[in-house]
Each structure stands twice: as C-alpha cells, then as structure tokens.
Amino acid sequence: MYRSRAYRYANEQVVLVLTLLLVLAVIIFTSTVTFCLSGVFIIAMFVLSALLIRSHHQALMRSAFRVDRARSPELADLVTQCGLKLQPGPVDVFVVNQKQLNAYTFGISSPKVLALYQPLLKVMNARELSFIIGHEMGHVALGHTWLNTILGGMAGIPVSFGAAVLLYTAFRWWNRMCEYSADRAGLLACGDLNVAVSALVKLVKPEIRDQRDFERALALVDAEDDSAANRLAEAFQSHPLVIRRINALRDYARTPEYQALQAGMNRNLGGRSQASPPPTGVIHLKSESAAPQERPPDLPPEERWPWLKRQ
Ligand SMILES: [Zn+2]
C-alpha cells in the first residue's frame, strides 16, 4: 500500500511552531501584565486605605479625647500598665464618644491609635478594661494593625466572583487567627482568666449586673456554636464565636508558655501594683458624676465563675 504525507504544505509545520510560540508569548505577556497590574492595584489600594485611615483618624479626633493623667488618671494608669507589660511600641489611646461597645486600633505609621468607645468605660470594670486595652495593644504589637491595611487592600483586587469569595474568606480566616492572638495579649495584660472571660461575655451581653446575669449570658454564649448556621456564618466573620475565644483562652491559660510569659511581663511592672485601680470599680472620667455603681460581689474567682472549672 503506497502511503505518503509529502503533500503537506511546506509552511504548515513552521507556522504551527510559530503559532505555539506566539501562544506561549501571549500567555507570558498577559500573566506578567496581570501580575504587574495586581501589584499596581495593591499599591493603589494601599494608598487609598492610608488616605481613608487618615481621614477616619481626623474624624475620630473631633469626637474623641486623648487619655491622659489629667482627664482620666485611672484609665491612664491602666494604659501605662498594659503598655509596660506588652511593650507594643508607641500607642496613643483615645476615648471616642460613640454609642457602640467597641475598641480597635488603626494606623500605618507610629504611633498607632487605640480607640476605646466610651460605653466600654461604663460596662467594664478596671480589670476587664485592661483585657480590652491589652487585646488592642496585642494587635499593635503583633503587626496586625498595619498588616490589616495592606491585606485589606489585596482582598479588594478585582477578580472573578469565585476568587473574590476565596480571597475574602481567607482574609477573614486570618482576621480570626489574629483575634485569638490578641485575646492572649489581653489575658497577659489583665492576668486573670476569669476577668478575660467576663470581658468577652460583656462585649456581647453588656447588661450584666450580678452573678446570675453573668451565668445566663454565659449559657447563651455557650450555645452559640451548637447551631450549624452560626458555625457556617463564622467563616465570613472577622471575629470567632465568643465561646471559641473563651475556650481558646482557657486552654492557653493552662500552658506553661502562658505562665512563663505572664511571669516575664509581670516583672516589667517592677514595683507597680497591677491592681492600683479598684479591681471591680468602674472607671470614671473627670467630667462625669461619680455616682456609685452597682458592684459585682467580690467572691474568689473559682466561686464567681464555677463554669470555668468545667472541662
Ligand atoms: Zn481584636
């Protein structure tokens, strides 16, 4: 049987090779351009975030006052003690006149800004506040404050919907890991697991007046992770479920690493007593009336929160 392919047009294979080379070149070129554009986009988002942060900072300053010894000596003491323990670097602390129960840090350059929303001062006692301040200083010390700005810019890269969901979810996942780290800083700052738990519970259930209120609130918080919907929703949130944060702190508080870090940080205080503000007292600003507040009973911690002993 006679069989030949000699009729192939002379340029066919040459053009095939050229075409393949061209496809390869286009792939390399477009991916390089995409990569460079992503880089440009990240830088643009970074600049935009920086500008937004600056204008937010300026807006905040209009409704805020800086924590200092003249206006709020007890709060200034707490800030100093948390700073001595955690050594976060330069941080300016402001009390913001807003209604929410919130605290956060921002800033790319030094000093970072730590904003405490005023209702925190009414809801939390002094030691619980040191957990909150310590938590925020932890974000500063661990670099979350500036990383958040950069990664937040990256999470805004224009990509397909699927990739955007993936980026957003990954970013939130990292956010939640940062919260666990910052909670540890809060625990190191206040030095007492019961205080840390109490502060976390009050963040979501602020109307706690006595032990019974606390236990009711804790039971509600404890039930959060029983629902599959809550567990799924957590994947898209910046903060873990409170019960998970409490359990993570409880596990951490048992470790020798925690004990060693706590001992080291306590030494930073030198002769200063950590409990110079009344441990269960409520912080007052000079401008507020110092009306007596209802105090939780001063029971030993294991009697106050027997739930904590549960395994
Ligand atoms: Zn946080």
Image: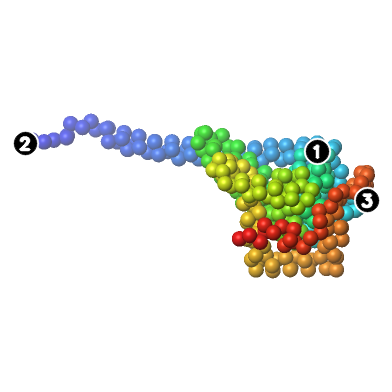
User: Quick check: is the Cβ at mark 3 less than 8 Å away from ligand 1?
Assistant: no
**Which residue is identified by label 3?**
70
Mark 2 or mark 1, earlier in chain: 2
Q: Amino acid at mark 2?
A: Met
Task: Say which element carries label 2.
Answer: loop
Q: Is residue 100 above or below residue 124?
A: above
User: Which residue is nearer to you in this view: 153 or 210?
Assistant: 210
Question: Label 1: how many residues lie within 10 Å, few (<14), some (14-19) or many (20+)?
Answer: some
Q: Quadrant of residue 183?
A: bottom right
Q: Residue at x 82, y 43 (%)?
A: 118
Q: Position of residue 199 (x, y in %)?
A: 74, 51
Given the current orientation, which residue lies at the most extreme left position?
A: 1
- Residue 1 numbered mark, or none: 2
Q: Amino acid at mark 1?
A: Gln
Q: Residue at x 69, y 37 (%)?
A: 48
Q: Position of residue 176 (x, y in %)?
A: 62, 48
Q: Quadrant of residue 85?
A: bottom right
Q: How is the image coloured?
A: rainbow
Task: Say which element carries label 1.
Answer: loop
User: Which residue is nearer to you in this view: 71 or 233?
Assistant: 233
Task: Say which element carries label 3.
Answer: loop
**Which residue is identified by label 1?**
98
